[in-house]
Image: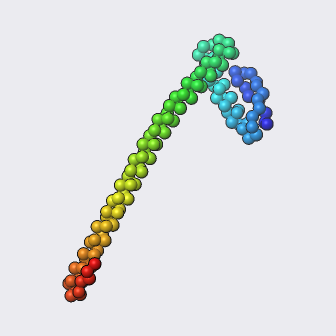
Amino acid sequence: MAQVTVTIDGKSYRMACDEGQEEHLIDLAQRLDRYVMHLKGAFGEIGDHRLSVMAGIMVMDELVELQKRVRGMEGEIATLRKTRDEALVKADRNDSTVTGVLVELAERIEALSDKLAGKPQSSA
């Protein structure tokens, strides 16, 4: 287990984290510190606990909004996937239809060619 020291609102906190996660933990602490400093600038010295609670609520509010956006995007992705799948099925059907028509047309062209060349027609 790795150990790092982070600073929030001018106070140092020693914390443990998984190996390789040190920079991530430091970044998270810096982001929380920015929330706390924002609140401190807006409301002044209102107490460490109150600042921490308000910063936590701000972070949770941001998280909830992001979760709503993610759910919306997941819905859009599902709709796009369904539309794509339907388009692929339709394209496959169209390809089959076009292939059938082309085969039929080729057979007619061959029959006409044979007829023009005076060859006997096969009974296919």
Q: Position of residue 92 (x, y in %)?
A: 38, 59
Q: Locate residue 96 relative to residue 117 in the image: left or right.
A: right
For this orientation, the residue located farthest to the top is: 46
Please tell me which residue is depicted at 76% across the width and 29% down the height of the picture. 15
* Tally of numbered tags: 0
Q: Nearer the viewer, residue 71 or 57?
A: 71
Q: Nearer the viewer, residue 79 or 24?
A: 79
Q: Position of residue 35 (x, y in %)?
A: 62, 23
**Image quadrant of residue 25?**
top right
Q: Position of residue 60 (x, y in %)?
A: 58, 25
Please tell me which residue is depicted at 24% across the width and 83% down the height of the picture. 121
Above or below — where is 29 with respect to 114? above
Q: Locate residue 89 relative to residue 15 in the image: left or right.
A: left
For the C terminus, the image quarter is: bottom left
**Image quadrant of residue 36?**
top right
Q: Position of residue 111 (x, y in %)?
A: 24, 79
Q: Nearer the viewer, residue 29 or 53?
A: 53
For this orientation, the residue located farthest to the front is: 123
For the N terminus, the image quarter is: top right
Q: Nearer the viewer, residue 28 or 109?
A: 109
* Residue 10 visible in this rendered orientation of the protein: yes
* Residue 38 visible in this rendered orientation of the protein: no
Please tell me which residue is depicted at 26% across the width and 72% down the height of the picture. 105
Colour scheme:
rainbow
Above or below — where is 91 with respect to 33? below
